[in-house]
Amino acid sequence: MVPSRTWPFIVPLVLLACGLVFADTLYKYRGEDGEWIYTDRKPTADKNAEERELSNSFKTPRFTVRHDNAGTAINLVAQNEFFIPIEVRLTFRKIQGVAFPHPDAPLRWVVAPRSELQLLALNIVDGFAAPALDYDIEYVPGDPSAVHRPGGDYRAPFAAGTNYPITQAYPEAITHRSTDSIYAVDMAMPVGTDIFAARGGVVFDVASDNYRGGLNPARDGPAANVVRILHDDGTFAVYAHLNWHSIRVQPGDRVVDGEYIADSGNTGFSSGPHLHFAVQRNSGLRVDSLPVVFRGPDSAAVVPSSGNVLTSYP
């Protein structure tokens, strides 16, 4: 199904994001019926539990626009804390006491990762009331000039030698109906399946502390756990519906093809345990998904198809 943390964001003035801090130990073991059990309570010795230290403390990146009063002008400065370029557009609803930009100005910029960029310098007009600005910010991740160049097939995002059924892939569009998900691939797998990076890159977005899933998009959509990874060609991958507090990476981490990043789950808008995987790009203030081909045996290419079983090859 479709992950919940969607871009673009449209907000008045400034979007704020909270920090994420947690420190836990997660224990994973088989129950009496063979099911995986997860708990933060240390089980008895006979459970043969796998212990995973979940200790992360990081500030969630954010994108903001601030006003710097330079005396004769008001400067609008964008600050991008993400580890990915951000394309931003301003739409003014009210502007008073300052010279308005040229009507043909596009009011769109690309702000480099971890940087600041002065968007506008609005000169204060003498003799008018105090300056006042009211505008919306719309932004999406990625540089719109990026071109998909994978340099090979994507690794299936789970342990080599294992296989899982594909429950939804292009052109089937049960829930993959928007541009950011039409080429996404859903793979059914038990909660707790180790998830590996299908391609190397830099982690730029993480949600890890959601625990519920359901069939109500409005209610359950925001409760998906995700990891987003920027590739070297400017495209990025999303891994969604991950398990609660199982994510092993944080923004700024560079991962390689085949690196363990999280456990699969059933969080967010989801009809059952599965992994939602998609490769995306910014197509100009719009996130589009892209066709992907997975690595098969003897360098063969595997095109994902609903109903087929996907095997992972290193």
Image (cartoon, helix red, strand yellow):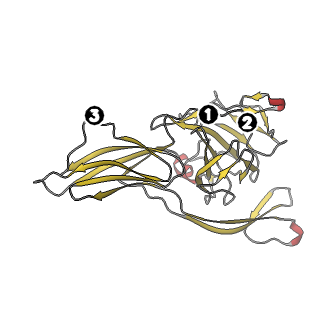
Q: Give the residue type at disc 2.
A: Ile
- Report the side of 19 relative to 121 (left or right): right
Which residue position holds label 2? 166
Please state the horizontal and vertical placement of residue 4, each as a whole percent of the image. 55, 47
**Mark 1 and 3 residues: CB-CB less than 8 Å, in contact?**
no
Q: Which secondary structure, mark 2?
A: strand
Which residue position holds label 3? 104
Please state the horizontal and vertical placement of residue 37, each as a whole percent of the image. 78, 61
Dot 2 or dot 3: first in sequence order is 3
Residue 58 to residue 83: above or below: below
Q: Residue furthest left?
A: 127
Quarter holding the N terminus is: top right
Residue at position x 81%, y 38% in the image:
313
Residue at position x 58%, y 38% in the image:
280
Kindly tell me whether residue 268 is visible in this rendering. no
Quarter holding the C terminus is: top right
Residue 188 is tagged as: none
Kindly tell me whether residue 235 is visible in this rendering. yes
Q: Nearer the viewer, mark 2 or mark 3?
A: 3
Q: Give the residue type at disc 1.
A: Ile
Instruction: From the viewer's side, name the closer residue of 85 and 304.
Output: 85
Dot 1 or dot 2: first in sequence order is 2
Please state the horizontal and vertical placement of residue 284, each as a whole percent of the image. 45, 35
Residue 174 is tagged as: 1
